[in-house]
Amino acid sequence: MNAVDPVTMWIIIVGLALGSYVLRFVFLGLVGDRPMPHWLLRHLRYTAVAILPALIAPLVVWPTATGGQPDIPRMAAAAVALMAGLITKNVLAAIFSGAATLYALLYLLG
Amino acid sequence: MADTTSKSYYWKGFRDGTPFIFVAIPFGTLFGVFATETGLTIIQTMAFTATVFAGAAQFAALQLLQDNAPTLIILASALAVNLRMAMYSASLTPYLGAAPLWQRAIGAYLVVDQSYASCMVRFEKEPNMTVPQRMAYFFGSVSPITPLWILSTYLGAVLGTRIPESWALDFALPITFLAMIGPMMRTLPHVVAALVAITVSLLTVAVPYNLGLLVAGCTGMMAGAQAELWLERRKVTS
């Protein structure tokens, strides 16, 4: 097991805890009912749909569990989860069809 | 918050939030396992998961820690992953901004993908809800997953590497987020933002310290905003 310097680790934990809270509180707590500039809202509307896909795209193409080798069950599961979400608009249905695809293909190809 | 209608909205939120336990349990377990593998103590892991309360950012921080990234880069990148919380906060403000400050202060800590998603569906469907009812619904929607998230992190940290690799828990994160992304693709600009962000993130994957994620996220947001402006202009001229 690798050792993590405790001071560094606690700086990261406390920094992230405070930073995350500030991000969550800033609008809800401080802005309240005051209006925000349109250009900012326009960009904020696309934060989730930009950051989340950017975060997972490399994990789908080069999964860590396979040592970065592209992997058919994981690619297929990703495609199924995305398509099921697009078609059904149902998060749970998408999760389950993605997971089912992953396990079925891991079993068949593994 | 104690009157009966608020109470029933709390349970409505609770019911709508319950399916997300299928996300919180594997995701929390996986974080516990990953944290132990990275070398965190149980206390560090639990402090991390209970105070930050944002799975994706926690994973990003640990991944960078394993890559020996500088502390400042770790903080900046993980907070960039959490920038969407600011958007959720902004988007919830018109609905909850009039609630008492202490409720908003506690609520802010509980702004996560799941509570945000549940609330936006319900608030848009029932525009006549009062602020106390909305607040009750919000707290209800995170009630099922919060204790299970913390408990499953603990179990993951304790059981650690004894969880077989064949369970492929590593892929709970991509599947969960992909499943959430599908229903988010409401308009053309949303699709443009996602496609641009994916392309840039794959092109910048070699950039150190996950900085490619920041670049990809910002580029995607700008693309989405520009696509929206372009659509608006076309509507005006046609």
Image (cartoon, grey):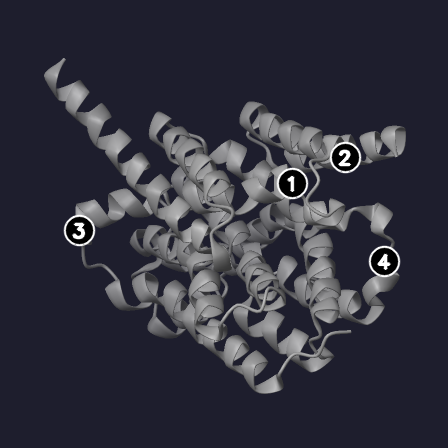
Residue A97 or A29: which is nearer the viewer?
A97
Q: Is residue B112 left or right of residue B145?
A: left
Pick whichever of labels 4 and 1 is earlier in the sequence.
4
Is B16 above or below relative to B187? Answer: below
At numbered mark 2, what does the secondary structure look like: helix, strand or loop? helix
The amino acid at mark 4 is Ile
Other-residue count near label 4 (Cα within 10 Å), few / some / many at <14 / 14–19 / ≥20: some
Image side of residue B97 versus residue B143, left or right = left
What is the chain identity of the residue bearing mark 3?
Answer: A
Q: Residue at x 45, y 59 (%)?
A: B82
The answer to whether the residues at label 2 and label 4 have Cβ atoms under 8 Å apart is no
Q: Position of residue B192 (x, y in %)?
A: 37, 30
Foreground: disc 3 or disc 4? 4
Task: For the residues labelled 3 and 4, say whether their Cβ atoms are less than 8 Å apart.
Answer: no
User: Which residue is disc 2 drawn over?
Assistant: A102
Mark 3 and mark 4, same subunit?
no
Mark-to-mark CA distance, 3 and 1: 34 Å
Q: Give the residue pinned by disc 4.
A: B163
Residue B54, x across and y down, in percent: 54, 61
Give the residue number, with chain letter if any, for mark 1.
B175
Distance from disc 2 to disc 3, alpha carbons, whole Å, reads 44 Å
